[in-house]
């Protein structure tokens, strides 16, 4: 059974559990603060493939394998798979998970895809549609930059507001089997558009959506920010985090003491030259798998609000001069 809360949230009467997770990353990510926490790292960023796109598919397969091994399940045990990426038609996911032959739902929520996949997985398990669901997402610096910005060899200077697309894939097995982390609720985000058009400043584009979802979660569940050990956004980075604090303060909330951002956690700003921080579907996903969930599993953190954020744009919409709206989904994770 599930129970609706407020305007956009669900509280699960019988909480689904995160029973397995896997994180696969590239060279630059391995050199950052979380480098030793990933399940697998490839210093070539190619993962045994010939193209960046094929490498991203390979990352997804590896992440799924690690997650299932961690949960002690096989593809035959998994009822459905929710997955997505940043590439056209979600090709990295469809080609990556094909060999597992798990019934699949392809998703696009930009960098919020890990939250979307986890929310849908939890809803399926709670509703009785499957005892074991797999959620996966990924991004690759090479494939994403080629598609969304400019040729890598162009040598154009990146503005300080730009973020660095994470090469990584995170996968999660959500099911009825008890573990030390449960998903007790979700808040599904709305599209929020402040009219910003700078795709090189995605933190600013996504911050309003993060604010909207966090405020909605607090109101729907009747909570104060300090009831969460951490409120962790996806990849607002240094620029977006500052904007989020300002927007939250105008709404009457101060989340500064317990806020963290995956875009800031994944790289070292001083030594790695990533400007505003990390971004991409893989940013929040591998930070959740390698850093956040272990802290919840150990009991160091009791309750976390995980809020991956996404900038909803395409090469067509950007080139036609459209604004870049954002979306954010919130997942309530609790130690148990």
Image (tube, rainbow, N blue to C red):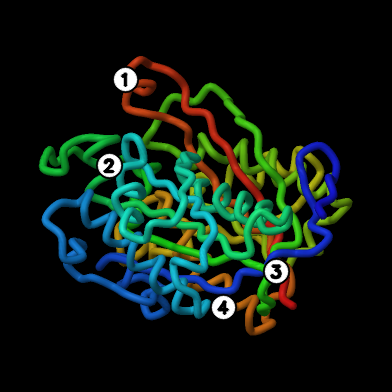
Cα gap from disc 4 to disc 2, whole angstroms = 34 Å
Q: Nearer the viewer, mark 1 or mark 4?
A: 4
**To which residue does mark 4 refer?**
294
- Which of the two marks, 4 or 2, is nearer to us in this view? 4
Mark nearest the camera among 3 and 1 is: 3
Between residues 236 and 297, which one lies in front from this camera angle?
297
Q: Earlier in the sequence, mark 3 or mark 1?
A: 3
Image coords of residue 1 (percent x, y): 82, 55
Q: CA distance from mark 1 to mark 2?
A: 18 Å
Q: Gap between marks 2 and 3, in whole Å?
A: 40 Å
Q: Which mark is residue 319?
A: 1
According to the picture, the residue beneath numbered tag 3 turns out to be 182
| Closer mark to the observer between disc 4 and disc 3 | 3
Name the secondary structure under disc 4: helix
Badge 4, how many Cα within 10 Å: few under 14, some, many 20+? some
Q: Residue 243: give x, y in percent of width and height.
A: 59, 42
| Mark 2–mark 3 CB contact (< 8 Å) | no
């Amino acid at each position: 059974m599930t129970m609706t809360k407020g305007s956009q949230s669900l509280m699960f009467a019988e909480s689904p559990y995160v029973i397995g997770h896997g994180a696969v990353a590239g060279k630059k990510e391995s050199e950052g603060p979380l480098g030793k926490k990933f399940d697998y790292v490839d210093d070539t960023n190619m993962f045994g493939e010939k193209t960046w796109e094929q490498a991203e598919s390979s990352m997804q397969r590896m992440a799924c394998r690690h997650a299932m091994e961690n949960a002690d399940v096989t593809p035959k045990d998994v009822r459905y798979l929710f997955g997505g990426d940043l590439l056209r038609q979600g090709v990295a996911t469809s080609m990556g998970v094909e060999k597992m032959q798990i019934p699949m739902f392809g998703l696009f929520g930009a960098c919020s895809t890990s939250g979307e996949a986890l929310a849908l997985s939890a809803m399926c398990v709670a509703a009785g549609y499957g005892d074991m669901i797999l959620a996966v997402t990924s991004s690759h610096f090479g494939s994403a930059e080629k598609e969304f910005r400019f040729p890598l060899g162009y040598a154009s200077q990146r503005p300080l507001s730009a973020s660095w697309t994470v090469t990584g894939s995170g996968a999660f097995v959500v099911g009825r089997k008890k573990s030390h982390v449960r998903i007790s609720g979700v808040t599904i985000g709305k599209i929020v558009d402040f009219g910003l058009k700078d795709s090189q400043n995605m933190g600013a584009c996504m911050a309003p959506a993060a604010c909207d979802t966090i405020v909605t979660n607090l109101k729907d569940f009747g909570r104060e920010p300090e009831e969460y050990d951490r409120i962790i956004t996806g990849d607002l980075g240094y620029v977006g985090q500052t904007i989020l604090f300002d927007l939250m303060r105008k709404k009457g909330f101060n989340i500064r003491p317990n806020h963290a951002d995956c875009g800031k956690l994944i790289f070292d700003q001083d030594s790695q030259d990533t400007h505003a921080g990390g971004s991409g579907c893989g940013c929040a996903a591998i930070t959740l798998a390698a850093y956040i969930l272990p802290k919840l599993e150990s009991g160091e953190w009791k309750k976390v609000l995980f809020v991956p954020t996404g900038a909803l744009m395409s090469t067509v919409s950007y080139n036609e001069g459209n604004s870049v709206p954002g979306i954010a989904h919130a997942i309530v994770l609790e130690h148990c």
